[in-house]
Image (tube, rainbow, N blue to C red):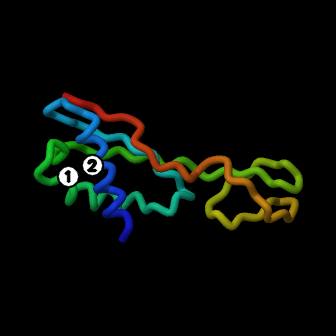
Amino acid sequence: MHELGITQSIVDAVLEAVDEPVIERVHLEIGRLSGVVPDSIRFCFELVADGTRLSTASLDIVEPAGRGECRSCGREIEMDELLARCPCGGVDIAVLAGQELRIKAVEVG
């Protein structure tokens, strides 16, 4: 499960960047095309944060939809998976959004 390693990196990055003793909430953005399972991140967060300044912090995850642009017709489409088909029949789609994996904000007390 690569989500455990990702979650450890998130916790490490927050702890390194924030000096405040109380961290109340961590806001993440995990795109639907990122290949990362938000529920697994939530589960791993509790494990990895235990015993740290993040142990009582809550986790807020936003999951932006995938969007792409068809290279054949130029139409922008929504994507639920990386292998998508444009209504024109084209399959050469440039991903525009949905692969994000980032810490958006950290709330401190």
In the image, is residue 85 above or below residue 28?
below
Distance of label 1 from label 2 (alpha carbons): 7 Å
Image-based side of 6 in relation to 46, left or right: right
The spot of residue 47 in percent (x, y) is: 20, 60
> Which residue is disc 2 drawn over?
11
Image-based side of 58 in relation to 39, left or right: left
Residue at position x 20%, y 31% in the image: 19
The spot of residue 35 in percent (x, y) is: 50, 63
Task: Answer with the quarter of the image where residue 46 lies.
Answer: bottom left
Residue at position x 28%, y 35% in the image: 17
Which is more N-terminal, label 2 or label 1?
A: 2
Label placed on residue 49: 1
Dot 2 crowding, Cα within 10 Å, few <14, some 14–19, many 20+: some
In the image, is residue 92 above or below residue 73?
below
Image-based side of 106 in relation to 103, left or right: left
Q: Residue furthest left?
A: 51
The local secondary structure at tag 1 comes to helix
* Mark 1 touches mark 2? (CB < 8 Å): yes
The spot of residue 95 in percent (x, y) is: 68, 53
The local secondary structure at tag 2 comes to helix
Q: In the image shown, does 32 or 94 lie closer to the viewer? A: 94
Residue type at mark 2: give it.
Answer: Val
Residue type at mark 1: give it.
Answer: Ala
